[in-house]
Amino acid sequence: MQNNETELEAAERRIRNIPRCGAAKRASMEQSFLELLQAIGEDPNREGLLRTPTRAARAFEFLTNGYRQSLDDVVNGAIFESDASEIILVKDIELYSMCEHHLLPFIGRAHVAYIPNGKVIGLSKVARLVDVFARRLQIQENLTMQIADALMKTLHPAGVGVVVEAKHLCMMMRGVEKQNSVMKTSCLLGTFKEDARTRSEFLSLLVGT
């Protein structure tokens, strides 16, 4: 948060700063949602649905804003010289993404670790890197690799380890309808992949409190 702004004001500021997809594309999405309502047998002119195409288009604009952000914009120069040489881990980063197969959400947490090689990245930037790739149509396997690759490319650390665990609504509210299944994926690069002791330490940090 900036200065003395409240949590609500901070959230509103972040929403205002989200890159927009443009009026023409948003209008196209609105038309698509209008046609979807008609296709499923709904009346888009009834009171509860009058503004639904507009609301849904704005929601998708928000949920896919990762397509309109670059790593340089997100990191914004927040890389600093450091003598730190041990594992730096950011646990329990909330993530919300959309399954590219069914356009339904999957919700979970990312755990991101790296071993500095002379430089560290601002703490909040790790979470923002997660959001850049989560706010796209995704499968969890690719999301995990993209987060790890982005941190490796941005910081050039000795190694990167990423674990993502999530629950998928495409499996919970349709199909097999299993409510308690959690998918876990990992991507290990550099020292995390090559050195068993480093990998073991990383995994022990994940299960620690």
Image: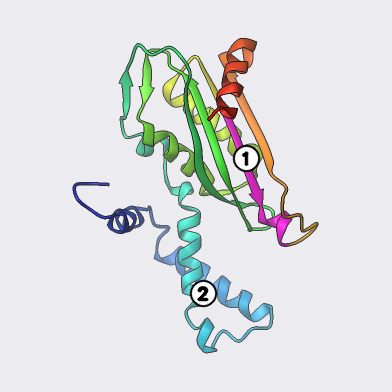
Q: Quadrant of residue 118?
A: top left
Is residue 169 one of those drawn in magenta? yes
Q: Amino acid at mark 2?
A: Pro
Which is nearer the N-term, disc 1 or disc 2?
2
Residue closest to the eye, 36 or 108 = 108
Q: Secondary structure at mark 1?
A: strand
- Image position of 104 (left or right of 62): right
Q: Which residue is mark 2?
A: 53
Label 1 crowd (10 A; few <14 / some 14-19 / many >=20): many
Where residue 165 is drawn, which disc sits there?
Answer: 1
Residue closest to the eye, 52 or 175 = 175
In this view, 29 is above or below 82: below
Q: Amino acid at mark 1?
A: Glu
In this view, 132 is above or below 33: above
In this view, 178 is above or below 152: below
Q: Quadrant of residue 111?
A: top right
Q: Residue furthest right?
A: 176
Residue at x-position 80% and y-position 57%: 176
Q: Residue furthest left?
A: 3
Residue at x-position 31% and y-position 59%: 8
- How are the colours assigned in the image? rainbow
Measured from the top left, where is residue 207 in percent x and y? Answer: 60, 28
Magenta-highlighted residues = 162-173
Measured from the top left, where is residue 134 in percent x and y? Answer: 53, 45
Residue at x-position 46% and y-position 73%: 54
Query: Is residue 190 in sight in this rendering?
Result: no
